Image: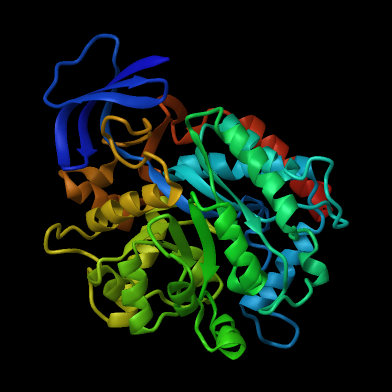
Amino acid sequence: MNRTFFFASALLPFGWCRNVRVEVHQGSIERVSIEAAADPRDQHEALVVPGLPNVHSHAFQRAMAGLAERLGPDGTDDFWSWREVMYGFLGQLEADDIEAIAAYAYADMLEAGFTSVAEFHYLHRTPKGGLYDDPAERAMRHLAAAETTGIGLTFLPVFYESSQFGGAPPTEGQRRFITDLDTFGRIVERVRKSAAESPQRKAGVALHSLRAVTFDHLAELLSRHADGPIHIHAAEQLKEVADCLSFCGLRPVEWLLRNTRLDGSWCVVHATHLTPEETVGLAASGAVAGLCPLTEANLGDGIFPAVPFRNAGGKWGIGTDSHIQLTAAGELRQLEYSQRLHSRTRNALATLERSSTAASLYDAALAGGAQALAQRVGAIAPGYRADFLVLDDRHPDLSGRSGDAILDTWVFAVDRGLIRAVIAAGKTVVVGSRHCDRERLDAAYRRVMLRLLGAGSA
């Protein structure tokens, strides 16, 4: 399918440009012309920026957003008690539920400004812990949800075998996650075969965490699946860091730096608790730090050292993780505000080269996100997927603004209300701020939630 677009103003890799004409072939950008003349056949839009890649998603957790915001009976609550609530919730989910929830989440992501996503998928087994006839059943449901909604997808089957460092047996709540090396290989092979059928799909692998995989099996997995992308949770919680030190004498990111070929094919998710040496080492490795600011704030994880990491040349991308709230602008804002609160300064992640804070954030998230997804996304340039956010140029809050001031207003003042339409792989999937299939997706999701929560009415 060939399509052409004409943008009165658009953010290109080298800055804002006027009268931009974009030619799209089979979902990818073929040609970009600046100060061009419009053609009557073009789809005209006034104000356009690239869609943002989402580096970390657990789609099923969208369905429990808001269900874990209650204090525990002992008067305390933290990440680990939240995890028990999550285990109890996922115990009910069937394959059809997963597809309906994922499609709902992906549509919401598109409306929120994310046009591609890395799905970190570890829910492999049936509610009773058995394997499906096709071990990749749950994986294929996510691919179907992405196809339905139009979001670009990098799918990451997750290897998960133990509950704690050293291969401790999984808990009852983790029984749906467990695979062995051979079963995992079958899942990866099935996903890669399916992903190869679409230019908008990519397959990689993920290791849940150092506590969930033995070091010997980690080495074997990296040998078998060396072509990446490779994602892993690491150093999200202080207890995780302490347990890792107790087990092997090294911190999680320190262990990765010493014992793996950490490079640009990796995404280290969260990396919240780093020493100065780890911060510099992770930055120098070329790996992407997969930051999920709203989830990390919701779970009380801590604050990633974004300023020293940036100063050391580190690359980072933005993820929505548990999807407590889906908003591309909100994730960037939370990242910046966490740094301001930590350092008691303003505009912490702006650069001298680009003094606009939102523009600096957006540039970094586009580049880091594209690297983490291992896809040509996040830029209005030839060879990239045709993913565009159409901002509402008539919004009152944009009055008198141009250039990077538009990004600053979107990220810090307006949020989702500024996204009028979304084009994914050259196809308009969001119109009037709503996904084109929103009514049907909402209905399917509502049926799942009413059954899961035992309610008789909305």
For the point 15% across and 43% down, the residue is: 400
The percent coordinates of residue 448 (x first, y second) are 76, 44
- Total marks drawn? 0
The answer to whether residue 184 is visible is yes
Instruction: Note whether 191 is above or below 345 in the view shown.
Output: above
Residue occupying the far top of the picture: 40
* Along the viewing direction, whichever of 199 and 92 lies nearer the viewer: 199
The percent coordinates of residue 188 (x first, y second) are 64, 45
* Along the viewing direction, whichever of 176 and 52 lies nearer the viewer: 176
* Along the viewing direction, whichever of 11 and 378 lies nearer the viewer: 378
The answer to whether residue 413 is visible is no
Instruction: Note whether 210 is above or below 440 in the view shown.
Output: below
For the point 47% across and 78% down, the residue is: 302
For the point 14% across and 27% down, the residue is: 34
Residue 146 lies left or right of residue 44; in this view the side is right
- In the picture, the quarter occupied by the N terminus is top left
Image colouring: rainbow
For the point 51% across and 49% down, the residue is: 118
The percent coordinates of residue 309 (x first, y second) are 30, 72
The percent coordinates of residue 6 (x first, y second) are 25, 22
